[in-house]
Image: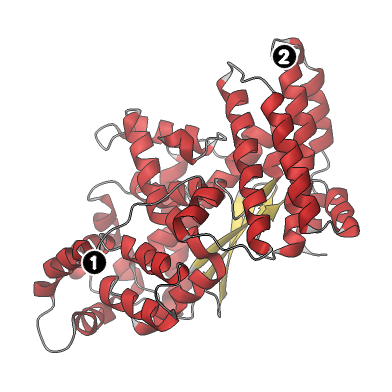
Amino acid sequence: MDVMTRVAAGVGGLALSVAVIQSSPAAQAPGASREREMDRIAPAYVKLALAMGLHDPDYVDAFYGPADWKREVESAKPPLDRIASDATALLADLKKVPVDEDEMRSLRREYLQKQLSSMVARTRMLKGERLSFDDESRALYDAVAPAYPESHFQAILAKLEPRFPGEGTLLERYERWRKPFVIPREKLDSVFQIAIKECRARTVAHMKVPAAESFTVEYVTNKSWSGYNWYQGQYRSVIQVNTDLPVYIDRAVDLACHEGYPGHHVYNALLEQHLVRDRGWVEFTVYPLFSPQSLIAEGTANYGIEVAFPGHERVDYERSVLFPAAGLDPARAAEYYEVQALVEELSYAGNEAARRYLNGSIDQTAAARWLEQFALMSPERAKQRVKFFDQYRSYVINYNFGKDLVERYVESRGGTSNNPRKRWDEFGRLLSSPRLPSGLR
């Protein structure tokens, strides 16, 4: 039994929960007719997303809705033109639904609009239309990342130069310096499991997660990404870690937080609990990867690392626990993260490489060279990243720009580093809501 069928077969209570919500006293309150109209639109949206998956194997990142919907779509095999016209018709129906004063219902309406609009744009791309990098990210992810000149990255690289004396290019010296921080392959799983345990403990200390949540870890190769969360429904995930390239010590916490706690796994579990099960909003049983939802998913997953390990807590924890577990010198933990903080300032260099490459101003080779020079990526990692550009295109903005938008949103609501309780509260509310990128500004 494939993943989608296995998961969907376990959601036998979904139809009942929807019926209960629709027949409850709340359904008689003002706004009930608007809710019913969106309840009518939501299943059609899900089926269109599943239909997109027949044309684009990367489109459906997760689905745990009714199995017969998937079978229905696979039997019908609607062409792209039909998907686009049906999505456009649903958008017209949504525009007729009055804006609701209830914030969650208003967010739901906007969510469906933005997701359907991005779906229409993706159909055009699959039919051969080429958008510029910024136009594509605006159409698919409801956001345009800032652009930076080479001088911006050169100034950061100049601060790194003195850290690595010796012969060779800055990249060569950086790679030599970095080599002692690789997690030995035989220790990778144990280190990762320790990191997961700590990330989970820090998350559940501040957020209520479903009691039945769990995930398993798999180690894979030949991927364009370093880690991936495949959400299964029923509060379960499969997290895959790519071992094609050396895994450095910082990736243990990064991946454990980003893919697990309080990142993708918690995000999907909270959406399932609060929106699918509690409210019966079936549109959240499908996650279209090329949609505005991805900026929220990736942005919260990256920002969640800082929420879980604020200030010096990460270095303190890794020095005392993860470095020894990996057999690395704990005395160098502070030095390592001082350098990593500077390297992190180069993150937008990846966006610039993708923007130039996808706009056609540079080729694959030049894009890889740009990443080596301005993002300090090894040749092997740079080639892997260009493969990511080929597969996921402007999706790259969701990681860094998504994180920046989420951070600014949470802090604007009082969730600053000086108020960690408020930060966790605002972060948790965002994870449990249908808010999309334009709603963060």
Query: Which callout, 1 or 2, points to the residue nearer the camera?
Result: 1
Left or right, residue 437 beside residue 271: left
Which residue lies at the image location 13% right of the left edge and 78% below the top edge? Answer: 164
Q: Secondary structure at mark 1?
A: helix
Residue at image mark 2: 26
* Residue 130, quarter of the rendered image: bottom right
Left or right, residue 437 beside residue 91: left
Q: Nearer the viewer, residue 433 or 3?
A: 433
Q: Nearer the viewer, residue 235 or 90?
A: 90
- Count neighbours of disc 2 (C-alpha within 10 A) and say few if under 14, some if 14 to 19, many if 20 or more: few
- The percent coordinates of residue 263 (x first, y second) are 48, 50
* Residue 283, quarter of the rendered image: top right
Residue at image mark 1: 150
Number of labelled discs? 2
- The percent coordinates of residue 416 (x first, y second) are 29, 35
- The percent coordinates of residue 62 (x first, y second) are 67, 54
- The percent coordinates of residue 72 (x first, y second) are 89, 52
* Residue 75, quarter of the rendered image: bottom right
